[in-house]
Amino acid sequence: MSGQLTASPESHASARGQVADLVRARRYTFAVWSALVAWGALLFVAVRDDYEGYRLGSLDLGGMAQAVWSTAHGRPFEATSLTGDQVSRLGGHVDPILALLAPLWLLIPSPLTLAAAQIAAVALGALPVYWLGRRHLLSEPLGFLCAVAYLLYPWLTWTALDAIHPVTFAIPLFLLCIWLLDEGRLGLFVGAAVLVAACGELMGLTIAALGIWYALARGRRREGIGIAVGGIAATSVALFLVVPAFSSGQSQFFGFYEAVGGSPKGMIETVLTDPGAIVGQLFDADVLLFVLALAAPLGGLFVFAPGLAVVGLPQLLVNALADPVGPIDPRQHYLAAIVPFLVAGTVLGIARLRPTAQAPAVLTVVGLSVALSILFGPWAGGQSLGSLWYQEELSASHVRALDSAVALVPPNAPVSVSNRVGAHLAARRRLYQVPNIRRAEWVVLDTQDLWLPDARLPVLSKRSPSVLEALRRRIEGLSEWKLVRAEDGVYVFRRVTPAV
């Protein structure tokens, strides 16, 4: 027909190419989703086994479950402290993101719901890693392998399994923040950054560092400075307004920093008057080993994008200056504001290599993650896949004894427990830790559980078995308590006279 338009062969080829690109992109997106779902399912099976095997206790799953249960029942963030007082969690840690888990609790009321939420959140961090890799490496396959390397990162697996810690939710959120800034989506970034700040009182410092990176690396000075100011403001409000409002004064966790001043003001004074104390802490052998452990699975390739990697420095400094060794144990949640920037920095660092070196570099990172996961992952040496409190497997008879003890305690009755059974009995208003039994109506004492509250710091410490035996004999000798059940070292007592 005269005047009819016909498509050129070139346009047909272009259309076919676009369709092929779309199909390929969808295929690799599906592959990433499949990998993260499989990873999450595997970890949930493991954490469920840990929960049922009483390897997840009052710290930290029980405390989080109680705070979420209280929030779901109209008492936001209320929990029982190790000293036996009813307190708001906001008096110690400002992590209101826990409130978002309350609807999940109402839907499926179990501590395992919270553990599953943490695993799912960490798994979803693979998506922004894939998006960054796809964009900067110009390759869906390499982007997919970057996401796989993220999921195989051994310390991430430990962290996801250690149920639960609100700061762990910051890992995928920080990765999302990086991607949103990389895409220039500032509106969505603000929303993600608010969620990050809700994960912990110190997350604002890392948000501030991310803003500085954005200002310098992307040339968005005004926006970057605004982000930095907002991050500093978030942490300042949390530490100096929220925590004092819900506690008797400054944060109880400042006690971890007695060696370098014991408070933000004290730390500044130490920097000015005794900088050697700060330097000594920062360059301690354990700190250097911690840095090496974080860097090794990534091959240290984030050094090619140092600006982004350095965003994790504020959290690294906080960890290094703490007195206990926990904050510099790569298996724990203290790496939550460090690892996202090392992972994203690795992706951007590889993108700066010559094109022919990028695929080998990504494969090297995957190989290192696999090898180090085999050597140091949660399953290494046949260890438990769960919390660091308990690595030993309990006998089947002891697990049955604990199950029977837990079943005896009525719902919502004030109970004092050994740490090991705390998570199973957390859905109640008052959950005390033995030896604090003054206001309890029930006591579940596991004489094989040697972790008891430390009077100096808000943590547990390991005691001698003789201490537990002495406690058992003391309770048995009190007339107001009746022994209800004794099996395999697990004792259940019920109060027979009203508490004073």
Image: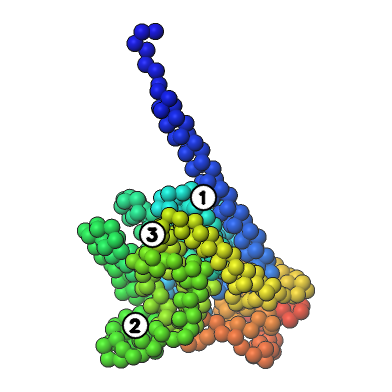
Dots 1 and 3: beta carbons under 8 Å?
Answer: no
Q: CA distance from mark 1 to mark 2?
A: 48 Å
Q: Earlier in the sequence, mark 2 or mark 3?
A: 2
Residue with the mark numbered 2? 263
- Residue at 73 percent of width and 72 percent of height: 399
Indicate the amino acid at tag 2.
Answer: Ser
In percent of width and height, residue 326 lies at 50, 79
Residue with the mark numbered 3? 352
Q: Secondary structure at mark 2?
A: loop
Indicate the amino acid at tag 3.
Answer: Arg
**Up-down: is 468 above or below 484?**
below
Q: CA distance from mark 1 to mark 3?
A: 17 Å
Tell me: 289 left or right of 315.
right
Q: Earlier in the sequence, mark 1 or mark 3?
A: 1
Image quarter hosting the C terminus: bottom right
Is 487 in front, or is 35?
35
Q: Is residue 66 visible?
A: no
Q: Which mark is residue 399?
A: none
